Amino acid sequence: VTTPTQDGTGVRAVGRARIAARTLRGDRWWLTPLAYGLTLLIVGVYLAYAVFVNKDYYWKPYISPMYSPCLTGNCVADSGWGWFPSINPVTPALIIIIFPAGLRATCYYYRKAYYRSFFLSPPACAVPEAAKHYRGESRFPLIVQNIHRYFFYITLIFNCILTYDAVIAFRDHQGHWGHAGLGTLVMVVNAILLWGYNASCHTCRHAIGGRLRHFSKHPVRYWLWSRATALNARHGQIAWASLVFVAITDLYIRLVAGGAFNDPRFF
Ligand code: FES
């Protein structure tokens, strides 16, 4: 067994114990980064497919969250706002995906997940990273992660739109109110999870309660901050649930719109 040289940072920094073993962890620490990496890969590939396929995203009154708001002239009839001309082969989803994808890519929780799973940086607690030097996020390119807060604010607009979509999903195919099907339920749950994701975001917690000297002078903000803090502790779980559910919502609407099965109606 060779003794590692102390020529770097982290566990190789001068003064750290010289331990030859890669890690002293005896559990299956690799299981979590593996599971997270596979989940990100599978959901990511599906969502990329949904973005580029450009069909079966609308079945009145349901619209896939990947295509809402549908802003270009080539949106399926009745589904879009038509603000921009068609820019073939750019799909309507490609224009809007930048913002929710940007929020997730720069999210503090996902950063932890994908740094561990894809860059092994580090792969797990008490398991040294492969790179010799730790560069952190204080210089390019990772310093760009700091734009997270802007994605947070922009995606609040998306959440409002998807909530509106969920409300108008209480109409039937002819546009009459007071009806609901399984797709309505799926869209409502999707909207709630997306709000939960933003509400539990670190930026949200800071925007509500940050920079306050005295909580006692701001009881409303303190109350909101307490709620955001409680949600923030669950941010990881909400992040997974909301991501997977966006894919489920798209898939459900895609299957109904494609004629794979009929949307079961509750009333
Ligand atoms: Fe995850 Fe902001 S920290 S969305």
Image (cartoon, grey):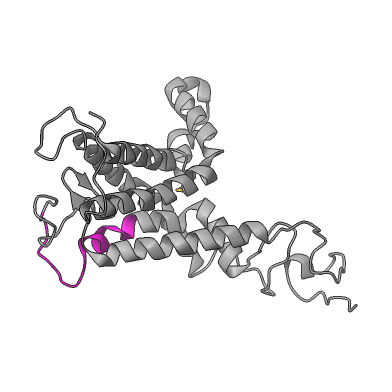
- Left of 90 or right of it: where is 36? right
**Residue 188 falls left or right of residue 221:** left
Q: Is residue 235 above or below residue 8?
A: above
Q: Can you tell which quarter of the image residue 164 is in?
A: top left
- In the figure, is residue 10 to the left or right of 5? left
Residue 130, above or below 28:
below
- Label the magenta part by its dominant secondary structure: loop
Residue toward you, 149 or 53: 53
Q: Is residue 214 above or below residue 56?
A: above
- State the count of labels: 0
Front-most of residues 102 and 170:
170
Residue 207 locus on image (x, y percent)? 43, 39
Horizontal arrangement in the rendering, residue 2 relative to residue 33 (left or right): right
- Which residue occupies 30% across, 42% down? 159
Please tell me which residue lies in front, 221 or 194. Answer: 194
Residue 89 inside the magenta-drawn segment:
yes
**Residue at horizontal 49 percent and vertical 32 percent from the top:** 212
Is residue 76 something that shows in the picture?
yes
4 or 38: nearer the eye?
38
Q: Residue furthest front?
A: 261
Q: Residue at x 26, y 64 (%)?
A: 94
Image quadrant containing the C terminus: top left
Highlighted magenta segment, given as a residue range:
82-99
Residue 91 belongs to the span the image colors magenta? yes
In this rendering, the answer to whether 128 lies above or below 223 is below
Q: Quadrant of the N terminus?
A: bottom right
Where is residue 214? Give x, y as percent: 52, 26
Q: Can the viewer see residue 146 in this picture?
A: no
Q: Residue 124 in the image: x percent, y percent?
A: 68, 59
